[in-house]
Image: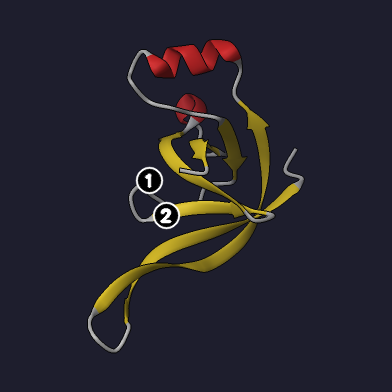
Amino acid sequence: MFRHRIDIQKRTRVFDGEGYIYDWATIDTVWAHISPVSAKERLEWQKLDVTVTHKISLRPYPGIDRVDHRLKFRGRVFTIVSILNPKEMGRRLDLICNEGA
């Protein structure tokens, strides 16, 4: 099921000599499954005024959140819109994402 290697990146604060800026640093590389969302799913999210393009599933990752983390796969960047724990089983996370945002 998990056949894609993705980078989990965290927003970090870096001193650039004049002040602090925010940048992204890869903190881990994990196995995941990436799939585009269906037209039906896309319409459901649009009702909430949210743009989504992909669902990325991975094993539970402690501390991941949608504000300070993003995913990268082969140069493509995915912003996390929502994090779902299917059936509250704790076996995988479904990250609802927007590519390129």
The structure residue drawn at horizontal position 36% and vertical position 13%, both measured from the top left corner, is 47
Q: What element carries label 2?
A: strand
Q: What element carries label 1?
A: loop
Label 2 Cα neighbours within 10 Å, binned few <14 / some 14-19 / many ≥20: many
Query: Please, which residue is most extreme toward the left here?
Result: 19
What's the residue type where badge 1 is placed? Arg
From the viewer's side, name the closer residue of 69 and 17.
17
The structure residue drawn at horizontal position 55% and vertical position 30%, both measured from the top left corner, is 53
- Asked if residue 62 lies left or right of residue 13, the reply is right
Percent x, y of residue 80: 44, 42
Q: Where the N terminus falls, by quadrant?
A: top right
Residue 68 vertical position relative to residue 51 in the rendered view, above or below: below
**For the residues bearing labels 2 and 1, Cβ distance under 8 angstroms:** yes
Residue 60 vertical position relative to residue 85 in the rendered view, above or below: below
Percent x, y of residue 75: 64, 56
- Asked if residue 39 lies left or right of residue 22, the reply is right
Residue 62 can be seen in this image: no
Query: Please, which residue is most extreme toward the bottom here?
Result: 17
Label 1 Cα neighbours within 10 Å, binned few <14 / some 14-19 / many ≥20: some
| Residue behind mark 1 | 66
Query: Please, which residue is most extreme toward the front here?
Result: 18
Residue 1 can be seen in this image: yes
The structure residue drawn at horizontal position 33% and vertical position 18%, both measured from the top left corner, is 48
* Quarter of the figure with residue 16: bottom left
Q: Distance between the residues labelled 2 and 1?
A: 6 Å
| Residue behind mark 2 | 69
